Amino acid sequence: MAVLVSFKSAVVCGEQLDETLLGGLRVLELADELGEYCGRRLAALGADVVKIEPPGGEASRHYGPFVDDIVDPENSLYFLALQLRETQCPV
């Protein structure tokens, strides 16, 4: 059995709804580096993912490789690749 789901743009109460699968859904990501991939996938499906980081930042910020080979928690390519379309909120 095949199921075809189609999402179209709609206006409800004067607000434009998103065409993505999870558009309009907000997700709080409280995961460690093992759960970051799930947050990335949810963001790719249209969810608004807000990552809550522990004090001192997420451990994956210290994983290489780094931009221009300069070790900096803000330039970890591993961390940046998993955080596309997410909003970070350090505690």
Image (cartoon, grey):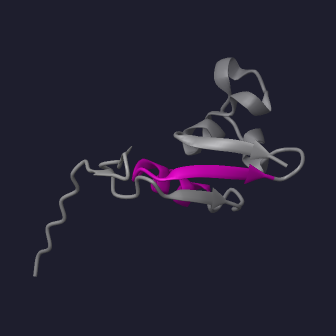
Q: If the image is split into quadrants, where does the N terminus sit?
A: bottom left
- The residue lying at 64 percent from left, 61 percent from top is 34
In the picture as drawn, the residue positioned furthest to the front comes out as 13
Total marks placed? 0
- The residue lying at 58 percent from left, 43 percent from top is 86
User: Compared with residue 50, is residue 27 higher up or lower down, i.e. above or below?
Assistant: below
- The residue lying at 25 percent from left, 48 percent from top is 9
Q: Position of residue 47 (x, y in %)?
A: 47, 53
Relative horizontal placement of residue 66, taking residue 15 as reference (left or right): right
In the picture as drawn, the residue positioned furthest to the top comes out as 68
Asked whether 28 or 14 is in front, the reply is: 14
Residue 47 falls within the magenta-colored stretch: yes
Asked whether 57 or 89 is in front, the reply is: 89
Asked whether 59 or 57 is in front, the reply is: 57
User: Compared with residue 73, is residue 15 higher up or lower down, i.e. above or below?
Assistant: below
* Range covered by the magenta-colored residues: 36-53
Residue 29 falls within the magenta-colored stretch: no
Q: Position of residue 18 (x, y in %)?
A: 35, 48
In the picture as drawn, the residue positioned furthest to the bottom comes out as 1
Relative horizontal placement of residue 4, taking residue 43 as reference (left or right): left
Picture quadrant where residue 39 is located: bottom right
- The residue lying at 11 percent from left, 75 percent from top is 2
Relative horizontal placement of residue 89, taking residue 38 as reference (left or right): right
